Amino acid sequence: MPSSTLRLLLFGFELALAFLVHAAYGTLAAAEVKSSLIKRWALPDLYEASVTELQAGLNEGDFTSVDLVKAYFARISEVNLAGPALRAVIETNPSALAEAAVLDAERQLLGPRSLLHGIPVLLKDNIATTASEGMNTTAGSYSMLGSIVPGDAGVVKRLRAAGAIILGKANLSEFAHYRGNLASGWSGRGGQCTAAYYPGSDPCGSSAGSGVAASIGLAAVTLGTETDGSITCPTSHSNLAGIKPTVGLTSRAGVIPISEHQDTVGPLTRSVSDAAIVLSIIAGPDPNDNFTLAQPNRVPQYERALSTSALQGARLGVPRAMFLEPAYSGLDNTVLSAFEVALETLKSLGAIIVDPANIPSAYQIYASGNESIVNAVDFKVQINAWYQSLYTNPSGVRSLADLIAFNDANPTLEEPTGYTSQSILIEAEATSGYNATFYQALAADYELGRTNGIDAALQQYNLDALILPANGRTTTPAAIAGYPIVTVPLGFYPENTTTRSAGPNTVYPAPGVPFGLSFLGTAYSEYNLIGYAYAYEQKTMTRLARKAYPAAIPTTQLEDIISQ
Ligand SMILES: *[C@@H]1O[C@H](CO)[C@@H](O)[C@H](O)[C@H]1NC(C)=O
Ligand SMILES: *[C@@H]1O[C@H](CO)[C@@H](O)[C@H](O)[C@H]1NC(C)=O
Ligand SMILES: *[C@@H]1O[C@H](CO)[C@@H](O)[C@H](O)[C@H]1NC(C)=O
Ligand SMILES: *[C@@H]1O[C@H](CO)[C@@H](O)[C@H](O)[C@H]1NC(C)=O
Ligand SMILES: *[C@@H]1O[C@H](CO)[C@@H](O)[C@H](O)[C@H]1NC(C)=O
Ligand SMILES: CC(=O)N[C@H]1CO[C@H](CO)[C@@H](O)[C@@H]1O
């Protein structure tokens, strides 16, 4: 029986019960029973609950943040190692319940600090939280287990100041997929994360656990990071809204790095509204990340961009030559035909579609080795600095060279069957710091991604944004440019899809698995991109067309916690 039918039946039953109580005990008792039953009927379903719904329930006193944390913990235990063993979460926060109680008390006295007051947030395990709170920060690697980081990441400081509760750490592709030729979503500490729309399906990475956790309501919202595809692709594979912000909009201080020229922190959520709320809070300058000091003066209130008419008159370009490039694997007929339908929908919402509107550098970007040079040199310099910055590290690892040796010395932890490669670490170790070759590669990337890339297409065709399917390697132009991407659900593979291997233990595509649509723009164009994505999302509501497979849907709801 669909849950909506069940709820209607229950509601009818509850009203009848209230009536009987009324007859037997008089008006007061009946009113009490009725109001408590109607409250329970009105509690948000944590599978889909939005930040504003949760915030309203907290303000109404329907439930507390302590209830929310308990409910999410229970949902995590149902599916993380038990049941479908999705392995989306590495650790939960042992201080979360105590923090929630303090924030509940503060709400009673003073009201909420922000829309995220008392809202549980899950962080990718490369985003630092102060060790005294009880959680590790490891990028999934045993080489950092028990290490003491200097403190909270810049984005975590902002979350805490807004009253958010850090619920735990999400699994990821180890080192944000900067380790070797490995399947997405695997880390030594977390094991193989799989997505919730088909058993054993590829969650994509590297923010794999953040995506899977958001998709089935293991937290209210989650944070991930992207260097090239790591928010966009898990957003796509988990039927979510995601924002990869401009490099420099959100602080990377306290984030285990790949490359300061490409890394960025952003939200993975069930709706564009939630993503906008989170971005408004985590964006802004941080003296500990000087890239953020170059951002425009004021962080916009991104919620204000949420208008269903945002696409009226917007000029959107289709960089179609990118689809023809063989390197863009993942753009099969299912995705491409859904994309064609999306173009018609966008037109019906008032957008002007310019097609084709090619990125002049598209072919050169895929032939170019510049991104690898920039990332390899940056990674070695920055990961060495990370290990050096740790107050203590029980593994004894203090450098990239130590890490490579540690992995080889601990094969059961870090090199189990099917997950042995560390080719990228070895390649990075072979680099020798910032020299002319590096700066030439960086300049070439900015030219390929910006001046002869995204900005060239935007200017040549007088566009507000570009649109692309989110699967495949469609993220690289924005990655090397440091430019933003906003992704929303586009469609699902049909039931008769033949599964293909995506790693030793994962498949993609598969019957019913989701894929997304991306809006790309120039630096700091998030406000407009959020508007376009929102208008499209509200028209299509694709996310609601399909749920996770039954075993991957946690059953614990707030009413189970409240009635205990
Ligand atoms: C890290 O994980 C270990 C082992 O699970 C645990 O004992 C410890 O409390 C965690 N936190 C820190 C900061 O080490
Ligand atoms: C950040 O500071 C470093 C030196 O500390 C400098 O090399 C770099 O250019 C600065 N970056 C920005 C974007 O200001
Ligand atoms: C970097 O990009 C430039 C411009 O496209 C190209 O000429 C050069 O060959 C690239 N370098 C590498 C190492 O691929
Ligand atoms: C810069 O270092 C790389 C190794 O990281 C090396 O291959 C390259 O030749 C060096 N370039 C110059 C100009 O020395
Ligand atoms: C899957 O079903 C659709 C109709 O729903 C059909 O057009 C398509 O050819 C089928 N594909 C395969 C691989 O059987
Ligand atoms: C919260 C949680 O379930 N964490 C688990 C993640 O996976 C590792 C490895 O299996 C377990 O040790 C953790 O308990």
Image: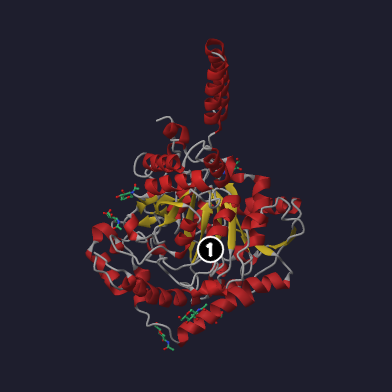
In the picture shown, does residue 484 fall above or below 435? above
Which of the 4 image quadrants contains residue 188?
A: bottom left
- The residue at the point 74 percent across, 54 percent down is 347
Q: Residue furthest bottom?
A: 436
Which of the 4 image quadrants contains residue 429?
A: bottom left
- The residue at the point 46 percent across, 67 percent down is 252
Crowd band around label 1 with a 10 angstrom C-alpha radius: few (<14), some (14–19), many (20+): many
Question: Where's residue 558, x and y in %?
Answer: 46, 36
Question: Where's residue 423, x and y in %?
Answer: 35, 69
In the picture shown, does residue 147 fall above or below 504? below
- The residue at the point 58 percent across, 73 percent down is 449
Which of the 4 image quadrants contains residue 174?
A: bottom left
- Quadrant placement of the C terminus: top left
Name the residue nearer the viewer: 380 or 473: 380
Question: Where's residue 164, x and y in %?
Answer: 47, 52
**Which residue lies under the disc numbered 1?**
473
Q: What is the count of numbered marks? A: 1
Q: Residue furthest front?
A: 109
**Quadrant of the picture in which ligand 1 is shown:** bottom left
Disc 1 marks a residue whose amino acid type is Arg
